[in-house]
Image (cartoon, rainbow, N blue to C red):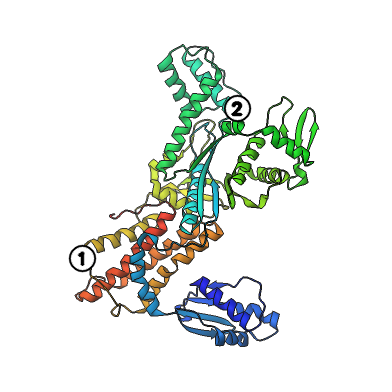
Amino acid sequence: MKSKLIEAIKKTLEDLDITYTNEIEISEPKDKENGQFSTNVAMKLASLLKENPLNIANKITDNLSCENISKIEVKAPGFINFFVDEDYLFNMINEIIKLGNDYGRSDIGNGQSYNIEFVSANPTGILHLGNARGGAYGDSLARILDFAGYDVVKEYYINDAGSQIDNLGLSIQARYFGLCGKEEIMPENGYHGPEILEMAKEIYDIHKEAWLNEPLESFKEVGVKKLLSRIINDLEEYGIKYDVFTSEKDIYQKYSLKDIVDNMQKNGYTYEQDGAIWFKSTSFYDSKDHVLIRNDGNYTYLVPDIANHINKYQRGFTKMIDVLGTDHHGYVARLKGALKANGYDDSKLDVKLLQLVRLMNGEEIVRMSKRTGNTITLKDLIDEVGVNAARYFFTMHSLDTQMDFDMELAKKNSSENPVYYVSYAYARICTILNSQKDVKVTSYDNIKDQDTIDLLSVVHKFPQVVASAAQKELPHLITNYVYELANNFHAYYSRHRLITEDENKTAENMNLIKAVKITIKNALNLIGVEPPEKM
């Protein structure tokens, strides 16, 4: 409805020969006496037209009409309030039931192709809380965009080459040597997690001392294969399945990294210094230049990453979204500048930086250290609080804000816990509906009171919330919405008897809450939460 109102206002302004290029704001008044929607456009126009905003508002309302709006009124100092037609709201109940899982789905994306690369954790350890937050955001955004008519590809970039993988192999090899009674020399930047010792022990149990002369490549291969398998399994348990896995090793084999650097050189964006080839990233967005090829002839991480993103451009995506940790802040300018240096439109790449997560247990901070192995992993979190709570809590917050994850709260079976509160609304509706038989309802004359209208007004907002979450790329709008809907339902339930002596009224109530149930389920599905039917 918001989009329809915006279009109606735009057309009215054109008809009145009023030029207004700013965004038309549609809000939802807290006081329902002021309608379901309101706009301040008349007040915004007052200084431009040098006219009283009330006069402007009256001119607009005299010429404005919008389908399914029963009344438009002007309130001082110049608000225009809109009242949604009640029959339209009640007729919507049957439409929602008919649409079922498709209620809220739209085609606003018009088939635009989006690539979302998220998590992409190095296969050098187990997934941690930052990965969990990035995973919840990336997967939820992909679900929302798909629901809104975008063509979405979820991608995982496997960093299975370079110095970090060398250190992984050396770490496993060192632990294996220790099990063989040899000196255990860990690399300077080695990995100390328990999973490293587990893999070394598995190699020892199978091969005993036969691998003492095995090349480093074998230890690297075992490490990457086993850790990547564990990462994928943990993500699948978390509700995330990828469409594409891209290997850094494959990038080296499929693409000429030399051609990329040569192209940047031809375009005037490289220079040689101290035996290394440098990228003039200061020519674009960066504060300092960066090495592309070291003086030992090896490529830095940036070059295969450029190739990876060029591959995405060649695959024809409308937009590419990378979800990275906040520690990659300086890398964004480097990567976007490198793409521009290769002749690509860097505005098609949007890098989302996820802020830090502080794990809490009530008021107590849970300390972590990945390097020493003393860490809470994604799997630990799932085992502790469940997938629903983990996904919901991470999606509650905007990605660019730091957050506390309270495990104690996430496990509470009370209204204090938002995921419990929302899930309980869904389960309560399921229990009521399961106790009643389906009765065909053609009209809703018995339940046309203000409480029901208010509840339906929230249900009615869902498609617009989905569209807004997709366009703004903000999954937390869905979480905010479903909590609001659950809150409205709980309040409604406390004030109304849903099963009555009047069969017609009961049947109307059942259809009403069935529409609420469908909306809650569809909203939660967009953030990867599967509500239980019994609690």
Q: Residue 64 appears in which quarter of the rendering?
A: bottom right
Q: Position of residue 487 (x, y in %)?
A: 39, 65
Res 404 seen here: no
Relative horizontal placement of residue 527, taking residue 185 as reference (left or right): left
Q: Position of residue 296 (x, y in %)?
A: 72, 24
Which residue type carries mark 1?
Lys
Which residue type carries mark 2?
Asn
Q: Nearer the viewer, residue 347 or 233?
A: 347
Q: Which mark is residue 425?
A: none
Q: Nearer the viewer, residue 320 or 216?
A: 320
Q: Residue 382 appears in which quarter of the rendering?
A: top left
Q: Position of residue 282 (x, y in %)?
A: 77, 44
Q: Which mark is residue 189?
A: 2
Res 128 seen here: yes
**Image: 451 above or below 167:** below
Query: Where is the C terminus found, in terms of image quarters?
Result: bottom left
Q: Residue 96 appears in which quarter of the rendering?
A: bottom left
Q: For mark 2, give the secondary structure.
A: loop
Residue for badge 1: 437
Q: Nearer the viewer, residue 345 or 44?
A: 345
